[in-house]
Amino acid sequence: MCLGIPGQVVDIVDPAQHRAIVDVNGVRREVNVGLVLDEGLAVGDWVLIHVGFAMARIDEEEAERTLTFMQGLGAIFEDEIGQFRGDEPGAVTAAVAHIG
């Protein structure tokens, strides 16, 4: 199952190529931000990520609510974080940290 997952922009690598680094629960990955770049995307903003694309900007409260809900899904959320990290499904065993 693939879910949209909140992540925080930590670096805009290449605006011309729509590339940014996003942090999801301590896991950093490069994602395509072309769908939200025109909205004035900046480091520190939160985005909803699905299959490597930032689909929408969201505020920090929405990100926290969504992550809290997803944590309650247990193995489904662990699999999603594992896929974001590049692990095999089910490989994540650590608890999800509070949004800092």
Image (tube, rainbow, N blue to C red):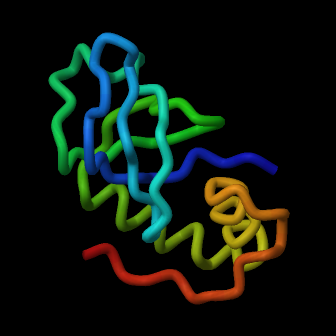
How far across and how far down the image is residue 82, in percent? 70, 65
Locate residue 80 relative to residue 33 in the image: left or right: right
How far across and how far down the image is residue 81, in percent? 63, 64
Quadrant for the C terminus, please: bottom left
How far across and how far down the image is residue 22, in percent? 39, 48
Q: Residue at x 53, y 30 (%)?
A: 53
Q: Residue at x 58, y 76 (%)?
A: 71
Locate residue 66 relative to residue 47 in the image: left or right: right
**Between 66 and 79, which is closer to the camera in this rendering?**
79
With respect to residue 61, does 48 lie above or below?
A: above
Locate residue 10 relative to residue 81 in the image: left or right: left
Residue 83: image quadrant is bottom right
Farthest front residue? 13
How far across and how far down the image is residue 78, in percent? 70, 72
Q: Residue at x 41, y 18 (%)?
A: 35
**Between 86 and 53, which is closer to the camera in this rendering?**
86
Q: Residue at x 40, y 57 (%)?
A: 23
